[in-house]
Amino acid sequence: MIAFRKLTRITAVFFWVAFMIPAGNWRTSSQQLSTTTHEDRDQGIKLFQLGDIEGALKAFRAGLRKFKDDEIAWYYLGLSLIRKEDLKGARKVFEKTVVLRPDFAPAHAALATTLLFTRKIKDAEKHANQALFSDPKNAEAHYVLGTIRLLQRSCADALAQADAALVSEPDFPQPYFLKSQSLICDVAETSLKPWFHDGKLYRTSTSTAELSKDEKLLNLKRTAARFKEAAANLERFLQLAPGVADAAMWREQLETLRLYAEPADKTEVDRTVFTGAEVTTKPRILSKPEPTYTDAARNAQVEGTVVLRAILAADGKVKNILVLSLLPNGLTERSINAARKIKFEPATKDGRPVSMLVQLEYNFNLY
């Protein structure tokens, strides 16, 4: 068996995240690959495992000129093309592989992943399900399905698929990332959708003025517990894949999650960031620039709301921005940039400036 190591940089298909999806570690399952040997193919596999991708490609292609129906050589050729970041070529090779061997779960899972990253979502789901039909424990297939569920904002289903992948392969990095993002998704969906408390309907988390301070703090602790779990999974991901693309950004996000998780374990006395219910005076906003449309978003007629969590810090700066709900075509980035430019006088608690957690919403409407 081989572990498919990291790709250096592939654009995400997630609309809920405006960054890079950490790619890599595509896995084969425990399914038997082959009972036969071919000199060129076996040499190619050795070269592939040693990281000599050019040598591996030559060996696999030489072998396939002799044995055109060798599905294992086709499969490893696809993996080698992925190492070269040739997703289009890899997809065609994996399509050939599953035709030659329809029950080959690793090839279906690899094809599902290439389809996911080339934005063929329905086809990716189809092949992930085919992989699981042949091998219900295929971790990569569970990861692909979880990614698709997260794309669809089915947070609980995405979380379940991440857990299923980790049951099969506890050291597979990507499901930890998926689990972290699924937990953040859950927080976003909970805070942005209508919810009931004590028999009353609240439209969003910003319309909870009627709740008592204790009720608000209880809700804060519940949310903080989700952030704590998200942080733990993101930390584990970074431990397993330290060289992932944009690692510095994800480490920054980890620190943000840890900060938002403080209420889960720390008392009000020990915390450095507070909510509006805990401060003596709230921040006084001096200026709040509004983001403008990008040409791409206007041409695509994108409308909706970008929702961010941020800290209005005691030093007068906006820090630790976390995206809860985003929009494509540059609108999320515009919103983050606008948030960073907010000018304010910090909140105070017992006469001293303190940092306060806020939720920022930026609405984009064309008419």
Image: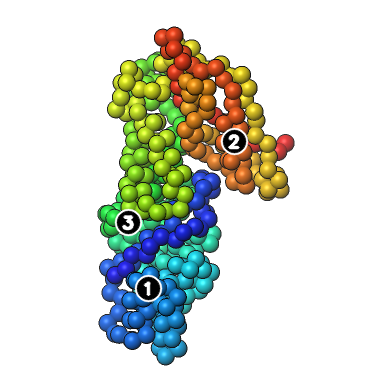
Query: What residue sits 43% from the left and 48% below the top?
Result: 247
Q: Position of residue 303 (x, y in %)?
A: 64, 40
Query: What residue sits 57% from the left and 20% below the top?
Result: 344
* Disc 1 to disc 3: CB gap under 8 Å: no
- Amino acid under label 2? Asn
In the rendered view of the protein, which quadrant contains the C terminus?
top right
In the rendered view of the protein, which quadrant contains the N terminus?
bottom left
SS category of the residue bearing label 1: helix
Question: Residue 172 — which label?
Answer: 3
- Label located before the other in sequence (2 or 3): 3
Q: Position of residue 196 (x, y in %)?
A: 42, 27
- Which residue occupies the extreme bottom position in the image? 66
Q: Which residue is mark 2?
A: 337
Residue 216 located left or right of residue 209: left
SS category of the residue bearing label 2: helix
Q: Is residue 248 above or below residue 63?
A: above
Estimate how packed mark 1 is, as few (under 14), some (14 to 19) or many (20 or more) residues with alpha carbons within 10 Å.
Answer: many
Q: Position of residue 169 (x, y in %)?
A: 28, 57
Q: Which residue is mark 1?
A: 48
- Judge by depth and name the residue closer to the eye, 7 or 191: 7
- Which residue occupies the extreme top position in the image? 351
- Amino acid under label 3? Phe
